[in-house]
Image (spheres, grey):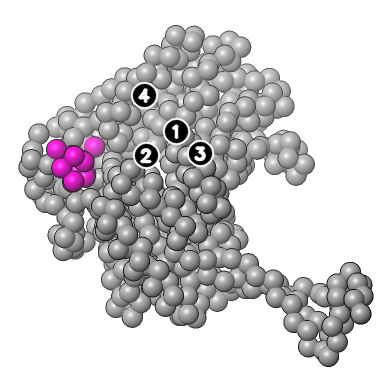
């Protein structure tokens, strides 16, 4: 295993990573975190790309002190002017779209189209935030008292902490940072140690643009271990909001610590997402959506399709067609033309995948496709074959209740829609859900306004579970954490509400008709 990346598998020079003093090009002798260096590995080859010098408790404290001062300056900037800064960041990201997207692919194994698409998502949310910068406002509220006016206004919240996972090393920061910036907040980003290079390049672009426009310190990056940096962040009262993306277990810990100091949490955690396929579904459409949802990003999206709940009358046909589609999937170098599935992030994921397959077999499941590792020619990384597992009669398959962050899709059958909905909602998480049907009555039942349909934060009709647009609020219920990011009114998480009442008369009038004379 080499200690430096080959030119074909190295970050593009235009991203300027070598300009960051934390960047370590040659990781010879760096034995991981014990050496104070986080090594980023290419999951397609298993070779190191580069290293990053870790932040310490002291450097974290210096960063927070500087951010506190930066926030005092930034919150005084008019929101439309803040929007101009975000617009300029979006334009700069467009300039580096391909290079940054390829770095995402290089570092976390997404195919190139998905890597570039992720950066495009950050550009899209920047565009959205620019418009929002001229629309943030509160309501005028009728007062019961004569010559009084009530209104509410939304004010900047403060420095916020953003903790991101490896699987979306650019876009999740974008959802948070672009909205927070136009709301008047400054952003401290702690990325996954599995994808520090993407974070360094992304944050450098945002910081450079903002600084060139006279606004230094709005975007800050801290790269460190959970013990040294992460625990300090979530316990820090100077960060009124912690937005954290990761596992349900991680989210529970973050939520408890932040709640203990009466701070705010925005949690985007796991998903065990299901697709219901009705007898009258367009199977061609359902098949394409299921396959993309199940194997995209090698099954490492929180919105990955992990369960298919097919009506018993069409289940055999659907599974056969899924298996044929899986047999045509090209697995290999994520930067190569024609590759549809790249590697998983590391050996731990491979082990979890194999363990889940073994448990599924022990529990009576039938592996219809995949279920094993694969070694594409010329690559030495971490690859598995996307798997389809058919549940036994009676649908008893306990392993399917767990979210294995790998490309395994479990298929169940049902006879009645109420049964299918109960199965969909039976898991602890509540992120994304979908149904394929040609019946208005069925789809409206799935979306029932009394809450008896899908219990997820995202509900799709004749679409798969993966691939949300930035215009809608993204997030889920139950163990998914309840957070909402991106569009709709998600901006409210980054601001504080103030109710204002003005008496423009000459008398003291108390509410509820109280007299105190």
How packed is label 1: few (under 14 Cα within 10 Å), some, or many (20 or more)? many
Label 2, on which residue? 297
Image coordinates of residue 94 in percent, x first then y, are: 33, 65
Image coordinates of residue 479 in percent, x first then y, are: 56, 36
Please give the range of residues in magenta. Answer: 31-43
Give the alpha-carbon distance from disc 3 to disc 1, as whole Å.
26 Å
| Between discs 2 and 4, the one toward the N terminus | 2
How packed is label 2: few (under 14 Cα within 10 Å), some, or many (20 or more)? many
Q: Is residue 193 visible?
A: yes
Q: Residue at x 47, y 52 (%)?
A: 243
Using residue 478 as the reference point, say whether residue 299 is left or right of it.
Answer: left
Labels 2, 4: front one: 4
Labels 3, 1: front one: 3
**For the residues bearing labels 2 and 3, Cβ distance under 8 angstroms:** no
Give the alpha-carbon distance from disc 1 to disc 4, as whole Å.
14 Å
User: SS for tag 4?
Assistant: helix
Label 3, on which residue? 252
| Above or below 198: residue 432 | above
- Is residue 34 inside the magenta stretch? yes
């Amino acid at each position: 295993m080499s200690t430096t990346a080959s030119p074909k598998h190295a970050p593009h020079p235009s991203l300027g990573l070598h300009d960051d003093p934390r960047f370590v090009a040659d990781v010879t002798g760096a034995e991981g975190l014990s050496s104070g260096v986080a090594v980023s590995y290419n999951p397609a080859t298993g070779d190191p790309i580069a290293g990053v010098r870790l932040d310490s408790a002291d450097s974290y404290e210096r960063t927070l002190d500087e951010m506190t001062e930066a926030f005092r300056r930034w919150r005084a900037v008019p929101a439309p002017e803040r929007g101009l800064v975000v617009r300029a960041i979006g334009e700069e990201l467009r300039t580096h779209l391909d290079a940054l997207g390829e770095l995402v692919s290089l570092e976390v194994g997404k195919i190139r189209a998905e890597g570039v698409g992720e950066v495009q998502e950050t550009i899209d949310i920047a565009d959205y935030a620019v418009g929002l910068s001229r629309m943030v406002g509160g309501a005028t509220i009728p007062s019961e008292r004569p010559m009084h006016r009530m209104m509410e206004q939304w004010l900047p919240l403060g420095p916020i902490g953003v903790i991101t996972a490896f699987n979306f090393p650019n876009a999740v920061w974008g959802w948070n940072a672009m909205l927070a910036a136009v709301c008047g907040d400054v952003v401290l980003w702690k990325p996954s140690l599995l994808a520090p290079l993407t974070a360094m390049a992304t944050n450098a672009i945002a910081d450079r643009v903002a600084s060139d426009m006279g606004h230094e310190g709005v975007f800050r990056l801290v790269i460190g271990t959970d013990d040294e940096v992460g625990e300090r962040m979530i316990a820090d009262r100077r960060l009124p909001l912690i937005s954290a993306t990761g596992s349900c277990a991680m989210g529970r810990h973050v939520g408890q610590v932040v709640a203990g100091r009466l701070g705010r949490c925005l949690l985007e955690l796991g998903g065990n997402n299901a697709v219901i396929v009705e007898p009258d579904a367009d199977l061609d459409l359902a098949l394409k959506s299921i396959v993309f949802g199940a194997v995209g990003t090698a099954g490492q999206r929180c919105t990955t399709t992990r369960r298919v709940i097919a009506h018993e009358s069409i289940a055999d046909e659907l599974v056969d067609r899924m298996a044929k589609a899986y047999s045509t999937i090209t697995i290999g170098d994520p930067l190569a033309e024609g590759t549809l599935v790249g590697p998983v992030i590391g050996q731990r994921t491979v082990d979890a995948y194999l363990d889940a397959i073994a448990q599924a077999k022990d529990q009576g499941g039938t592996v219809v496709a995949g279920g094993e590792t694969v070694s594409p020619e010329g690559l030495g990384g971490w690859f598995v074959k996307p798997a389809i597992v058919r549940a036994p009669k009676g649908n008893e398959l306990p392993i399917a209740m767990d979210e294995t962050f790998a490309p395994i899709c479990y298929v169940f059958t049902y006879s009645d829609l109420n049964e299918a909905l109960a199965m969909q909602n039976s898991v602890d998480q509540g992120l994304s859900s979908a149904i394929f049907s040609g019946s208005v009555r069925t789809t409206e039942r799935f979306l029932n306004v009394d809450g008896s349909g899908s219990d997820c934060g995202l509900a799709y009709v004749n679409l798969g579970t993966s691939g949300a647009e930035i215009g809608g609020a993204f997030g889920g219920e139950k163990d998914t954490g309840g957070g909402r990011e991106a569009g709709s009114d998600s901006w409210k998480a980054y601001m504080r509400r103030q109710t204002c009442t003005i008496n423009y008369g000459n008398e003291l009038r108390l509410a509820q008709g109280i007299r105190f004379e």
